[in-house]
Structure formats: structure tokens, C-alpha cells
Amino acid sequence: MDESLESVRDAPDFVTRLAVEYGPQVLSATLIMVVGFFVARWAARFAAGSLRHFHLEPPVHDLILRAVRVIVFLLFLLMALQNLGIDLLPLIAGLGIVGAGIALALQGVLGNVAAGLTIIFTRPFRVGEYISIAGEEGIVQTISLFSTTLRHSDLSQVVIPNRKIAGEILHNFGEIRQLDLGVRVVYTTDINDAVAAIREVLADNPRVLKEPAPVVQAATLGEYSIRLAIRPWVAVRDFGPAPGEINPEVVRAFEARGIEIAVPLQVVRTEELGQSSVAGGR
């Protein structure tokens, strides 16, 4: 009982000795960490101002700023640990072992990160471009370390892990796409007149780009008609609505010029009578 009372009486003295012996080190380490936090933020802002002159992609810009903050903060953390008298060599060795275990457990995640870094720095595609990859296609919305997000024409989103992208065959349409339209005319049509009518329609449509120039030509010679290919270039966002505007205008332009649009023909043979007839229909 007396020993217990004595230990209780000695507790304040023990705490006081700890405070006197380790208090300054703990206080200075805490101050170092606080200063490191603000220095890391200042270094990131300074780096952001310097990076404006390089016109980097948003993912690259964000990655560099995060790396600057982490590196600066880690330097101050090492200074704080040294101030506390902690031997850093065993700590670094322990962290290496723990890191190896984490790497084995998170192989898929690290694979996405490695692929994301490859995409960010090699830049096979950029935000706003239309791509086709891994059986999916759409406009690139975001590129992160872990995944790439595409937006379909129906406004749905597809999130693709970066490891599914790296090493795959990529079709990058860029920011413009070429429509593949067409119309069939009869053989008695003046081809030059029909092509001129189509070019006027394309020139009047605000969605059709002037450069590259639209392709309008006689593509195929069929059995009963000539197919005129209509292949203008439009912005990716106009790829869906543009055909609905161009096709009706081509029909109206042909009607105004008296150009006949060919209709499909079907040959029906009657063997009993030894005759054949030709039927037309849309």
C-alpha cells in the first residue's frame, strides 16, 4: 500500500522529467511539421505559377503539383524525425519491407498507376478527343492515374482502367470526325450538277468544317444507279446531329434542280410465262 502511494506521489515528478527531457524535442518536431505543411503548399503554388508557361495537360499538371507537395513534406518529416533522435536507417528498411508487401497486395492498382503515368507522359490522346479503345469509344472526359473516363453520344460514361488501355490498339479520331453519307442517282443524271448541289448544301451548313474540305464524288457504279459519296468533316460534338440536317437539305436541293434520286429495283421473273418484270420501290 505504501509503495502504491509512493508511486502515485512520484508520478508528477516522472511526467515533469519527461517534459523537461523530451518536451523541447517534441515541440521543435511539431513546429517543423507545421512549417513543412505551409512550405509544401507554398512550393506547390510556386510550381503552379511556373508550369503555366509550359501548357501541360491537366493530368500532368496535377501530378507534378502533388509530387512537389509530397516531396517537400517528406523532407520536413525526415528533419522532424531526426530532431526526435530516431535512427532513420532501420525505419527506412522497415518501410521498404512494408512497401514490398503492399506492392504485392495491390498489383492491379499499381498496374493502373503505371499505365496512367505512361498515358499522361506519352499523351496518345488528350481530353476532348474522340477515341476507340478496348471495345469502347467516346470523347475523353478525364485522365487520372487510375482510369480514363469516356463520354458516349448518349451522354453515358464509360470508366476504363488504365491497364486496359496501355498496350492496346488505339484509334484516335482527334477533335473532328468524317461523316460517311451517300445518295444514289439515276444514270441520266448530270453528275457535275448533282455534285454542285451537294457542295452548296454542305457550304451552307454551319456544322460542316471548311478545312479539311468535304469529299463529294461518284463512289460506285451500280446496276441501276450511281452512288454519290458525301463525306464532310465535322466537330466531334456535331457527329450525331449533322446527318439529320444534311440529308433533308440534299433531297430538297435535288428536287429544286430536277435531279432524280434512284430507288431500289427488284427484278421479278415469271418462268411459266417466260417473261420478266421490273418493280421499283423505296
Image (tube, grey):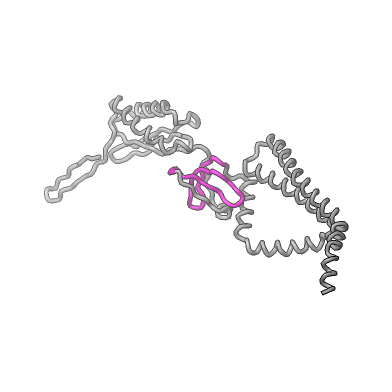
Q: Main secondary structure of the magenta part?
A: strand
Query: Quarter of the image containing the C terminus?
Result: top left
x and y percentages locating residue 106 in the rendered image: 63, 61
Q: Tell me if 112 is positioned left or right of 47 in this view.
A: left
Question: Which portion, as a residue range, is magenta?
Answer: 127-154
**Residue that appears at 59% across and 52% down:** 146
Q: Tell me if 106 is positioned left or right of 160 in this view.
A: right
**Residue that appears at 24% across and 41% down:** 265
Seen in the picture, residue 270 relative to 175 is either above or below; the reply is below
Q: Tell me if 202 is positioned left or right of 254 in this view.
A: right
- For the image shown, how many numbered marks are present on the structure? 0
Query: Quarter of the image containing the N terminus?
Result: bottom right
Instruction: List the single residue furthest toward the left.
Output: 273
x and y percentages locating residue 241 in the rendered image: 40, 36
To which quarter of the image does residue 278 belong?
top left
Q: Is 11 within the magenta?
A: no
- Which is nearer the eye, 174 or 69? 69
To which quarter of the image does residue 57 belong?
top right
Seen in the picture, residue 25 relative to 151 is either above or below; the reply is below
Seen in the picture, residue 133 relative to 16 is either above or below; the reply is above
x and y percentages locating residue 49 in the rendered image: 71, 36
- Which is nearer the eye, 73 or 116? 73
**Residue that appears at 84% across and 69% down:** 7
x and y percentages locating residue 74 in the rendered image: 76, 51
Instruction: List the single residue furthest toward the bottom.
Output: 1
Q: Is 145 within the magenta?
A: yes
**Residue that appears at 46% across and 38% down:** 178
To which quarter of the image does residue 277 belong?
top left
